[in-house]
Amino acid sequence: MTRIFGRVVAGFLALVLGMNLAAAEPTHGIAMYGDPSLPPDFVSLPYANPDAPKGGTIVFGETGGFDSLNPYILKGRAPWGIQSHVFETLMARNWDEPFSLYGLLAESIETGPEREWVAFTLRPEAKFSDGSPVTVEDVIWSMETLAEEGQPRYRNAWEKVRSIDQTGERSFRLDFSEPDSELPLIIGLRPILKKADWEGVDFAQSSLRVPTGSGPYTIGAFEPGRYIRFERNPEYWGRDLPINRGLNNFDTIRYDYFVDSGVLFQAFTAGALSVYRESSPARWASEFGFPAVTSGAVVKAEIPHGRPSGMEGFVFNLRRPIFQDWRVRDALLHAFNFEFVNQTLNGGAFPRRASYFANSALAMGEGPAEGRVRELLEPFADSLLPDALEAYALPASDGSPRNRSNMRRAAQLLAGAGWTVQDGVLRDASGAPFAFDILLMNGQDEAVTNVFVDALRQLGIQVGVQLVDQAQYNERRNDYDYDMIINTWNMSLSPGNEQMLYWGSAGVTEPGTRNYMGVASPAAEAMIAHMLETRDEAEFVASVRALDRVLTTGRYVIPFGFPDVSYVAYKADLRHPETLPVYGDWIGWLPEVWWQEPG
């Protein structure tokens, strides 16, 4: 763990020292700040084994199902593996750096001195799986179609694009309408689809039509609700690129679907699956003594990481009047007995998510806002909660089941907000009861929910739990049709435009964003704007810490704990390089750099 955090700090310092605001010539890569770490002649990613053997099959388990093969639209449920295995982007990430990209479909990238424009040149050898070349026409069509008919995250960034023009047989340029240091990188990560493949097809409609991509795998056999196979394309155009050396080693990647996590775990213990990720340290300690583990046929590994904690917990929907008073939200925060839940369900192993960027240098930290963070927030002091600029910490209990001190404080806060207990029921001045429902997907965190519901009932709050299937859950979440849900926002070391999708006020009414709590904060939007405009790394860090403070002290979520290691069990014939990326067990690592030992 120390080694990973040391690399993160060293990486940030290198970015600051290497900062160069001058216009760049066409280059092999781009970083959010300074220059990318890997030189033009790099051999492979630092966490990949360029000599890894090819072949074999790896089988993952998933809960739920799918009814679409288009992962870029709101309608339908598509296997997430389509995005990572079948389609490609202009640039590819090195997950050992906070935010650096290297050429994939594009052989080079160039930006203006203030990143007011970006230009790409496609590789002449880039091809789709049917052998047809990837063209500038495909790129322009993909970007425009995703912005017009794809998920909202594509439209949000595209609104800052003034124009996109072809400048040569394989080159094109985008000009931007406003400052945004991240936008060239965002454009570099847009998936590129084949225009001709979608002729006569309604892109926005969900279907099981097999699409054509340019990636290392094609979609093989599948049965909705049961499985999908991805087959390695032996003619894959990019197999010898440095960014791909040691990647995409399995001949077949298969995802099997199960009704719930319990059945999935049984399938793994029976040998039907290759890999199992465990989320509970208590189960990791108590339930992984089955014969395959004791015989050595299955390996248990704890993979450290240096990524931010992100946020997971009970989410208040502020679109509901009952949750608009911050004292009510603070009361429910006090009623949630995290220490007891953590000890009971996780053996006390998880640290709590103290903020949205905990476990990283981007976190708001302890104590009052100081220095540049305070300067950024002070113009918004009147719109922030009373303690936003002062020292703030989540309420903590003594770990006992009753949580008496915090429950007393919760009752005081509710009384201050106009809620009093009458005949055992918490009511407002008009006599209306305090009542709401928690929407859960079947099998989702029912144990922690039951503990929370019991505590709330002691306060006189009437709480119902609605269990629905994945399709209903996703539909209601997209439409904000709930009182409270459990949600997770994963965060990176390079937050950017996605933060507006998460916390932008447009999401209060616009469906399909990830502003599930209904945040409408001028301070949050201003911090995001500053984060995107600045080219100074210190200013960037200050703006993220300020945003973290706005969100954390806003009491929009009742935070859970987070694993500072990943628990991964896998068949003994699977291998991975000893060098780990900063992000650990994350995107781009499993199955990308793993392989199966021959024999």
Image (spheres, rainbow, N blue to C red):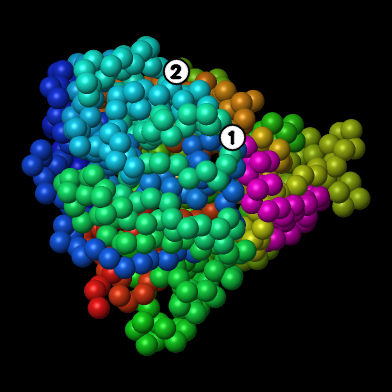
Mark 2 = which residue? 159
Give the dominant element type of the magenta stretch: helix, strand or loop.
helix
Q: Seen in the image, is 512 located left or right of residue 414?
A: left
In reply to whether residue 491 is colored magenta, the answer given is no
Residue type at mark 1 is Gln
Q: Seen in the image, is 485 located left or right of residue 227?
A: right
Quadrant of image for the C terminus: bottom left
User: Is residue 590 visible in this depiction of the protein?
Assistant: no
Is disc 2 surrounded by few (<14), some (14 to 19) or many (20+) residues within 10 Å?
Answer: few
Q: Which mark is residue 205?
A: 1
The residue at 81%/50% (across/down) is 462
Q: Which mark is residue 594?
A: none
Instruction: Tell which circle, 1 or 2, labels the residue nearer the N-terminal end.
Output: 2
- Comparing 443 with 271, the one in front is 271
Q: Residue 539: image x %, image y %?
A: 30, 26
Q: Residue 200, relative to residue 335: is it above or below?
A: above
The residue at 87%/52% (across/down) is 424
Is disc 1 surrounded by few (<14), some (14 to 19) or many (20+) residues within 10 Å?
Answer: few
- Comparing 211 with 434, the one in front is 211
Q: Secondary structure at mark 2?
A: loop
Q: Residue 46: image x %, image y %?
A: 18, 52
Q: Residue 214: image x %, image y %?
A: 33, 41
Residue type at mark 2 is Glu
The residue range painted magenta reads 450-478
Q: Residue 159: image x %, image y %?
A: 44, 18
